[in-house]
Image (cartoon, rainbow, N blue to C red):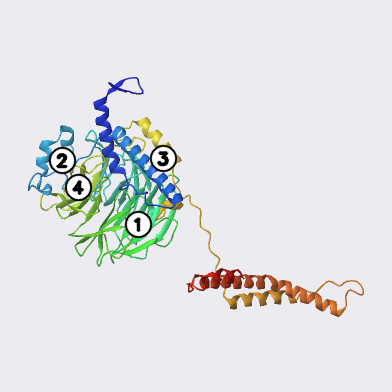
């Protein structure tokens, strides 16, 4: 016996039970704890509302479990140690012997001692990588075919490199100005207004190129129209620590006084300033969900902060230096100093990071930047002698959404995606600390109650304003002095009336509150039968 499916085929009962058991296990993962016990509730209305909510939670958990089962076939995996073995003691050579050929190709070292140190950047799909050497070397690589697309020598200092909306354009922060190049290495634009830029960041949802220069000036350039959106002086000195929060598009800067400032292009002042360290900040990174921020300071501490509730104390404080930090798609944190790279993992799901893997490059190599490759279990390391790539199991998202980022997209798909992304471009006004406020109704401001002196002053001003009004001259017998005086008194009374009525209403409200307080006072048993009569009178 079996169960008939939609396509007419019959599924065996044993297989159906196996799938249902698997779905039940997945549903438990998406449920928000145990169900609420509604038997003890006496309020029928509240009981009905909670029952409806519990039913909705159950349906959403089932839908998420089915989506994970059928639409997300690949599962991510981490290193698992046996017995007394530790994961951070496992070397890259041991991992390379156990993985498949395609994964082993992602483990390599490129040695270019005369052109480093190198900084790296990946496209959102992880297929292309841009490498920029401090001594003028720029290169674009196709990571799928492991081939060189283009390399150029600009013959001047390169401090940073970043891709724009796709692999066809990238920006390089050079000695005097940032430049924009296309995929063929042709110089398209020289952004002289930005000055000598130290760091670049691209906001892909808003098509904005953000830069911070030697003078501590933050600039936003719209790469679609070419106009300068904003130009602000931070007032906190020179900094080369700059990151964009992927959740809300806010640019964060780390300063030499230990503060972190967050900016948006429509505000000339910082949205938030937070003292995170006692010394200069050396590195900063944001979790992909945008709610967790990691900062590193000169006092040899790495701190994790919850951006939804910025308390005085961080979530976790880890010992050690970090010249560069980066979060992976699955939440692994990579830190590096000198020639040592460490990867931390939140194994318990409570935002408590512990040592997961370590890697030491050749002694004497100075790491410039670490960057996880999207949708791959790969960590790119740019250092003083070139760049390297190591395998970090569990770091990348195993399932990609082709509508968001497709590592295997064709040129036609790329053109379509570029058009759609331009149509969906968000204006700079949508950048804010809490983007969930977009689309909500602004709450009405409560009218501030005026003091008694202010009411009297307003009433006197209204009376003085009407005193100067001369009544119209009327026919004989109707323009007597007594009638004119009476008319003036009526005008003054009409001016005073709204103020007196408002004052009367406030007095009545105060009297009602006092009466309620008197009623709430417990009376002796012998007098309780009279309380209702008194309140009625």
Q: Nearer the viewer, residue 109 or 292?
A: 292
Whichever of labels 4 and 1 marks the residue nearer the N terminus, that label is 1
Expressed as whole percent of the image width and height from the top left, the position of residue 356 reads: 16, 49
Which residue is at 24% across, 45% downward? 372
User: In front of the other: label 4 or label 3?
Assistant: 3
Whichever of labels 1 and 3 marks the residue nearer the N terminus, that label is 1
Q: Mark 3 points at which residue?
A: 421
Q: What distance separates the C-alpha of mark 1 from that of mark 3?
A: 28 Å
Which secondary structure lies at badge 1?
A: loop
Determine crowd level at label 4: few under 14, some 14-19, many 20+ residues with C-alpha closer than 10 A. Answer: many
* Residue at far left of view: 84
Q: Nearer the viewer, residue 188 or 400?
A: 400
Which residue is at 14% across, 43% downward? 80
Q: Mark 1 points at which residue?
A: 308
Whichever of labels 2 and 3 marks the residue nearer the N terminus, that label is 2
Whichever of labels 4 and 2 marks the residue nearer the N terminus, that label is 2
Q: Name the residue under label 4.
A: 381
Determine crowd level at label 2: few under 14, some 14-19, many 20+ residues with C-alpha closer than 10 A. Answer: few
Identify the disc placed on residue 108: 2
């Amino acid at each position: 016996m079996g169960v008939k499916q939609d396509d007419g085929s019959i599924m065996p009962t044993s297989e159906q039970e196996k799938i249902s058991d698997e779905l039940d296990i997945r549903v438990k993962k998406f449920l928000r704890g145990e169900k609420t016990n509604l038997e003890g509730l006496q309020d029928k209305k509240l009981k009905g509302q909670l029952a409806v909510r519990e039913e909705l939670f159950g349906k959403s958990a089932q839908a998420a479990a089915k989506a994970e089962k059928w639409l997300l076939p690949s599962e991510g995996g981490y290193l698992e140690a046996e017995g007394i073995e530790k994961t951070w003691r496992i070397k890259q050579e041991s991992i390379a012997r156990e993985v498949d050929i395609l994964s082993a190709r992602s483990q390599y070292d490129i040695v270019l001692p005369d052109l480093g140190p190198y900084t790296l950047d990946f496209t959102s799909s992880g297929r292309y990588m841009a490498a920029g050497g401090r001594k003028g070397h720029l290169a674009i690589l196709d990571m799928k075919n492991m081939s060189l697309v283009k390399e150029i020598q600009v013959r001047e200092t390169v401090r940073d490199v970043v891709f724009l909306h796709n692999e066809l354009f990238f920006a390089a922060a050079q000695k005097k100005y940032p430049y924009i190049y296309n995929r063929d290495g042709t110089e398209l634009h020289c952004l002289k207004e930005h000055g000598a830029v130290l760091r670049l960041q691209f906001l892909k949802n808003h098509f904005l190129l953000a830069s911070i220069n030697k003078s501590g000036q933050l600039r936003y350039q719209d790469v679609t129209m070419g106009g300068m959106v904003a130009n602000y002086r931070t007032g906190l000195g020179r900094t080369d620590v700059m990151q964009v929060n992927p959740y809300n598009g806010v640019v964060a800067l780390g300063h030499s006084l230990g503060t972190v400032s967050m900016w948006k292009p429509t505000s000339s002042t910082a949205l938030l300033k937070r003292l995170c360290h006692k010394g200069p900040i050396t590195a900063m990174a944001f979790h992909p969900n945008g709610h967790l921020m990691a900062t590193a300071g000169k006092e040899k501490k790495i701190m994790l902060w919850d951006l939804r509730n910025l308390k005085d104390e961080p979530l976790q404080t880890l010992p050690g230096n970090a010249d560069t930090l980066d979060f992976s798609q699955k939440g692994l944190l990579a830190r590096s100093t000198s020639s040592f790279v460490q990867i931390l993992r939140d194994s318990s799901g409570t935002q408590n990071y512990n040592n997961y893997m370590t890697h030491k490059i050749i002694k004497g190599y100075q790491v410039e930047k670490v960057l996880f490759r999207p949708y791959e279990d790969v960590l790119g390391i740019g250092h003083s002698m070139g760049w390297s790539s190591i395998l970090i199991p569990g770091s990348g998202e195993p399932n990609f959404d082709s509508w968001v980022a497709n590592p295997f997209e064709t040129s036609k798909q790329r053109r379509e995606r570029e058009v759609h992304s331009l149509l969906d471009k968000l204006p700079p006004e949508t950048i804010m600390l809490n983007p969930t406020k977009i689309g909500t109704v602004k709450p009405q401001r409560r009218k501030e109650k005026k003091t008694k002196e202010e009411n009297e002053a307003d009433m006197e001003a209204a009376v003085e304003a009407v005193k100067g009004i001369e009544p119209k001259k009327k026919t004989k017998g109707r323009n007597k002095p007594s009638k004119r005086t009476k008319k003036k008194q009526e005008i003054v009374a009409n001016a005073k009336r709204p103020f007196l009525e408002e004052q009367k209403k406030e007095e009545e409200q105060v009297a009602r509150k006092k009466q309620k307080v008197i009623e709430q006072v417990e009376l002796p048993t012998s007098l309780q039968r009279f309380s209702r009569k008194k309140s009625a009178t």
